[in-house]
Image (cartoon, rainbow, N blue to C red):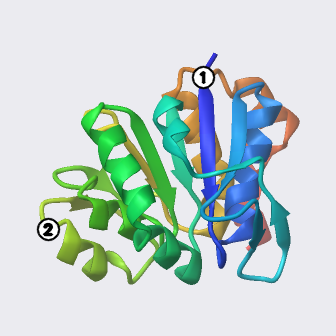
Amino acid sequence: MAKVAVVFADGCEEVEGLSIVDVLRRLNVSTDMVGLTSKEVIGDHQIKLTCDKIVDDSLLDYDLVAFPGGMTGSANLRDNQKLRDLMVKRHENDQWNAAMCAAPRALARYGVLADADYTVFPGLDPETKKDAPTGNFKENITVTDTKHKVLTSRGPATAWAFAYAIAEALGVDTKQLKHAMLYDYLADTIQDSL
């Protein structure tokens, strides 16, 4: 069975991180909430989150590690040397890494986006290009680069799409849950609500 870690840092976008955890746990994917420096994390909207564990070498044991965004949260992820070292090792080991919203800039700083297809929150591509000039920016809702084992997405409203893309990259069938959570209904009818 696949095992996923979602890394939460102070200032993270709560809805992004929790959407990943929620969808994957509904799909019976073992998913741990991992605090960057503490089990207690305060999100960008002052929501207190309690994680299962703190970042350590066990991140190397997960099939996929995912980062939620948030400007402050993603900067905390980007600038943490211990996390950087672990994510570089994961990338060298050809393991899946995922980030959404502003967090792809952390993957860019680590060198994980070199030559990879990716997306990022609108307006942040110039920053990612500085750290990953050979990366290939796309405007898709989610971008899955199977060659480089990188999965990225754009922002809070794309969190479910990102979570489902993560599950699908790990070989999990998402069709029934998409229907049960009305995701397929949303995809078919959202234009009617705008």
Percent from the top left, x then y, of residue 164?
63, 39
Q: Which mark is residue 2?
A: 1
Quarter of the picture holding the C terminus = bottom right
Residue underneath mark 2: 133
What's the distance in space between the residues labelled 2 and 1, CA to CA?
32 Å
Percent from the top left, x then y, of residue 171?
54, 20
Rendered view: 20 above or below 134: above
Quarter of the picture holding the N terminus = top right
Badge 1 amino acid: Ala
Callouts 2 and 1 close, C-beta under 8 Å: no
Looking at the image, which residue is at 71% across and 81% down? Answer: 44
Q: Is residue 118 visible?
A: yes
Q: Quadrant of residue 122?
A: bottom left
Looking at the image, which residue is at 44% across and 68% down? Answer: 80
- Between 6 and 82, the one lying in front of the other is 82
Rendered view: 20 above or below 133: above
